[in-house]
Amino acid sequence: MSKWLYQVLLWVAYPWVLVRLRWRARREPEYGQRVGERFGRLPEHIRSGCICFHTVSAGETIAAAPLIATLAEEFSGSDGLSVPFLVTTMTPTGSAQAQSRLLEHAQHCYAPYDFRFAVRRFFDAVRPKLLVLMETELWPNLIDEAHARGIPVLLVNARLSERSQRGYARVSGLTSKMLQQVRYIACQYPDHALRFKTLGATDEQVSVLGSVKFDVRLPLDHAERVASIKTALGLNERPVWIAGSTHPGEDEIVLQAHQRISRHDAASCLLIVPRHPVRGLEVETLARELGFSVTRQSTGIKPGADVVICDTMGQLQTLYGLSDVAFLGGSLVSVGGHNPIEAAICAQPVIMGPATFNFPDVVAAFVDAECLTMVQNASELANAVIECFENESVRVARGERARRVVSDNRGATERLLDLLRDEIRTAIT
């Protein structure tokens, strides 16, 4: 695909983008707020001349927050070097995490959609000295405009699945030019580095530094938060399992599994966490149709329910601490699965479905350590949970192995800090 054709397709898509924003805002009101930011119209309080990090959504923001906070503190005026930091996201969940975790360290706004006019308006207002993209945020106009203005672009904690590589290869001309405009690509795994090189990146551009997501740590008050919610829900004496970040079509499978689990142990409780909290009522309706007693966090929790719908934002890490075993959503439907690290750090045996293409290397590490069970359907999911409920020694051993996988793979944040410190100093001096 040529750059010219890409611009034409964007303009064709422009009306659809506006309609889709309004449609999403009907279900998720946050998408109807701050719309101007998505087209480069930024709040007046945003300071220019900043170091800009783009973290996309909640998971990337959570993983990047310690890295950004450390750098922001280091470059807040010591040794004569001072520069503001800006964190951009694309989703409301990412925005919420940026504001709650980085409020004292960085400014925040939405990133512009990749329309040329929106990108130019964004750069005119922000005038960043360095643009750091997390994971796989490759947008041709964003990168091309940064390159034209002499703004170095770094892609860090970079990952590229086989599926994504095939997609980028279909527009190889556009992809190759875009990668040539990126100064440096710090990949999570060797396979990812090879895929970037196959698409046109050079050996000099690419390195492997590991995944910062393994560097996540529990907050100091994690145990207190867990104990408070556990008491409020009456879960202290009950076997509990969690289905984290579920998607449409998957909730039904999870609830069917819980029917079998409940027949085996009537005291068991399921915490189900929809990936999009706005779906809480929808999931509650499904659970009630199957005969479960249900309570929903957003409307006030009541103890003793068979199923707890956790439809509030920013609590997933705490909720994993409540359970005995964790199922990771997005894996029994074709979403590609969600990151198991947040569950593993809470010493949870992990269960996933067959669709794990979003995090194949991470999943492989847990499978190799024999602490992640793969299931295909509701029956296998129920059996995996029941096994953990019945055999405490097996459950504890798997949970500890999962936590050890996380600790054994830490260190990427420190390596990235060394890289970014040098790049920031070069950019601001």
Image (cartoon, helix red, strand yellow):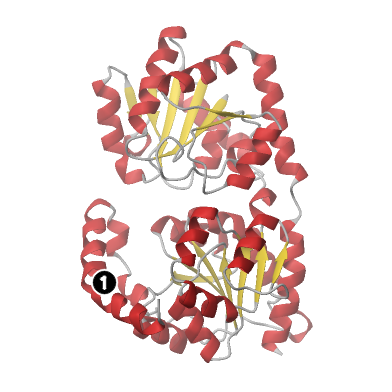
Residue identified by numbered label 1: 13
Few, some or many C-alpha atoms within 10 Å of disc 1 (few <14, some 14-19, many ≥20)?
A: few
Q: Quadrant of the N terminus?
A: bottom left
How far across and how far down the image is residue 285, in percent? 25, 29
Say if 204 sits above or below 223 in the image.
Answer: below
User: Going by the image, does 107 lie left or right of 192?
Assistant: left
How far across and how far down the image is residue 39, in percent? 34, 77
Say if 206 sits above or below 49 in the image.
Answer: above
Q: Quadrant of the C terminus?
A: bottom right
Q: Name the one closer to the observer, 340 or 105.
A: 340
Say if 1 sits above or below 157 in the image.
Answer: below
Say if 164 sits above or below 87 in the image.
Answer: above
User: Going by the image, does 324 lie left or right of 406?
Assistant: left
Residue placed at 73% from the left, 60% from the top?
A: 209
Q: Can the viewer see residue 323?
A: no
How far across and how far down the image is residue 19, in percent? 20, 65
Amino acid type of disc 1? Ala
User: Could you tell me which secondary element the residue under label 1 belongs to?
Assistant: helix
The answer to which image quadrant residue 288 occupies is top left
The answer to which image quadrant residue 75 occupies is bottom right
How far across and how far down the image is residue 41, in percent? 35, 80
Q: Can the viewer see residue 10?
A: yes
Residue placed at 37% from the left, 16% from the top?
A: 259
